[in-house]
Image (cartoon, rainbow, N blue to C red):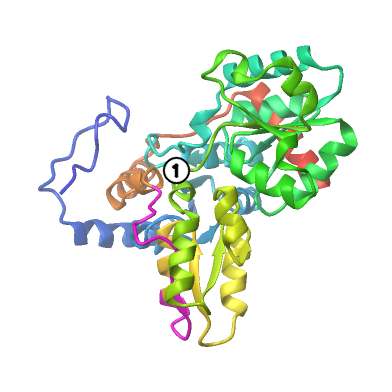
Amino acid sequence: MLNLFDENTFDSHLPQISEQDCTDQQVLDQIWELKKELQDKVILLGHHYQSDDIIQYADITGDSLKLSQKAAQLNNPYTVFCGVHFMAETADILTRDDQDIILPDRNAGCSMADMANDDEVHKAYDYLTSCTKEKIIPITYINCSAKLKSFVGKHDGTICTSSNAQKIIKWAFEQGQKLLFFPDQHLGRNTCYDLGIKLDEMVVYNPHQVNGGLTPEQIQKAKVILWYGFCSVHQGFTKEHIINIKKESPDTIVIVHPECSFDVVQHADDSGSTAYIIDQVEKAAPGTQFAVGTEINLVNRLAQKYTNKTIKSLSPYQCLCTTMYRVRPRWLLASLNAIKEGRAFNIIKVAEEDKHYARMALNRMLEI
């Protein structure tokens, strides 16, 4: 059993509570009690990839942008975001100053978002723009830090989600001749290919190599510069998984998230955002068989909800978002107790300048 507080997770001045204080069931029961007691103060947001022992408490479930937009429409002074760090930042960008966004565990991050930082992107942009006279429009996937959302706001770019990436990329090519897409290379490649851009017109910038591993000639030839980043969960699916599924059950529909690799998306029957996957499963006729290439908690939840269909993970292995899993019931209980006692912690605050330009980029996306 875990301690309620972990010194690596919470501020060091917070008291330590021994593992003997509460059983796991007592923790779950206390969350329900506090949730009811604090219902006028607190709204709980749960991302689709959260485990069931967390999602059961969510007032609203959804993807990161939807949850942030919902939080901005509410008047609760505290929003507990059961997601990862960049999601809580997005919520802080969109909500009012008198609304506090709380992340139960500050160590709940995103490996993809961590693959592109502010210094690296500035360095890349400076090099890329020095190599060509054509205008480069920077587009960031919403799975990134507030600083990178701010960066695209400052540099005539915008943000995209997996749902609207096609519209955003079309817009970008109306504004300039080249595209810098970060941090997820796979979403960028899959979307651009669907829009008719050839694979040999795309190059990958790797910040761990000199000049990203690209020559000026490669940059001048390319239409799209993709950041080298990827989602560790969706990277786990392979075309061999699809081949094996189809051998065993040819009628199974393989549907995957566009964060999967190019080969996986090309071999799948369908691909789309989390919301799209949910919608396709919901609309399918009884008896339909699905192999789904996305995070395992969502796949299992769909299987439990639509028992008249066969729904399983595309991979035989557990494709779990381990950083999302850092938000555990004991951390959630700690957050609620702290709010009740007037000592809320792990409040996520984005610097005002970054908030200004990031909001500009988000508004630009919504206008598109």
Residue 198 coordinates in the image, percent (x, y): 75, 43
Q: Nearer the viewer, residue 289 or 54?
A: 289
Q: Nearer the viewer, residue 40 or 327?
A: 327
Q: Residue at x 60, y 19 (%)?
A: 212
Q: Is residue 63 visible?
A: no
Q: Residues within 10 Å of mark 1 (few under 14, many from 20)?
A: some
Residue 181 coordinates in the image, percent (x, y): 68, 34
Q: Residue at x 54, y 50 (%)?
A: 260
Residue 315 located within the stretch drawn in magenta: yes
Return the residue at label 1: 232
Magenta highlight range: 304-321
Q: How many marks?
A: 1
The kind of residue on which mark 1 rests is Ser
Residue 74 lies left or right of residue 23; in this view the side is right
Predominant secondary structure, magenta span: loop
Residue 232 lies left or right of residue 25; in this view the side is right
